[in-house]
Image (tube, rainbow, N blue to C red):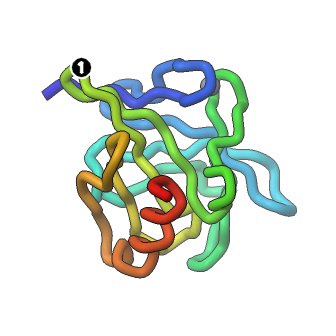
Amino acid sequence: MKADFLCPNCYGFLNVNEKLVFAVKKKGQNGGVFLFSPSLGDYSISHHHSFETEDGEQVDFHCPICNHNLSVEDGDKFARVLLREDDKEYFVVFSKTKGERCTYKMSNNQIEASYGDHFVNHFDFVSALFFK
Ligand SMILES: [Zn+2]
């Protein structure tokens, strides 16, 4: 299966060499770069050791190409990217809070799949946000 992750603003590709690349920002700290696994539900992150985050802290995710803030409108606890998978398009919505494992793969009209230990906590909120 071929999967590409794209910025919803500039449509630049965010996946490089089996990693998903984000520019990240946090209050009181210089920016950094996070490398995610492109496998949904795999929460391993690589980043420079100087960029410290603690569980419960919120990080802002930006497109590394156009610097667009990937936060969800009206749902600032979440960020989203486009996923193009076998010619179909989805949104992938994930929590911006460190330690909160919560990811949703969404089509135009429903949540197609949920991932992470905490997806139940926000399922209704995210559903309501996108599918009023
Ligand atoms: Zn972009």
In the image, is the residue at mark 1 within 8 Å of ligand 1 by its beta carbon? no
Q: Is residue 6 left or right of residue 79?
A: left
Residue 10 in view: yes
Residue 114: quarter of image: bottom left
Q: How many marks?
A: 1
Q: Position of residue 83 (x, y in %)?
A: 36, 33
Q: Position of residue 81 (x, y in %)?
A: 49, 39
Q: Please give the name of the residue rendered at 53% of the width and 18% of the height, measured from the top-left corner.
A: 12
Residue 118: quarter of image: bottom left
Which residue appears farthest toward the right when viewing the image? 28
Q: Nearer the viewer, residue 66 or 29?
A: 66
Kind of residue indicated by mark 1: Asp
Q: Please give the name of the residue rendered at 63% of the width and 61% of the height, measured from the top-left corner.
A: 75
Residue 88: quarter of image: top left
Q: In what quadrant of the picture does the N terminus appear? A: top left
Q: Is residue 63 left or right of residue 67?
A: left
Q: Position of residue 52 (x, y in %)?
A: 66, 64
Q: Nearer the viewer, residue 132 or 99?
A: 132
Q: Which residue is mark 1?
A: 87
Q: Please give the name of the residue rendered at 60% of the width and 56% of the height, measured from the top-left corner.
A: 49
Which image quadrant shows ligand 1? Answer: top right
Q: Nearer the viewer, residue 6 or 73?
A: 73
Residue 52 in view: no
Q: Please give the name of the residue rendered at 35% of the width and 78% of the height, measured from the top-left corner.
A: 120
Q: Position of residue 64 (x, y in %)?
A: 63, 29
Secondary structure beneath disc 1?
Answer: loop
Which residue appears farthest toward the front when viewing the image? 132
> Badge 1: how crowded within 10 Å, few (<14), some, or many (20+)?
few
Q: In the displayed structure, would residue 74 be above or below residue 36?
A: below
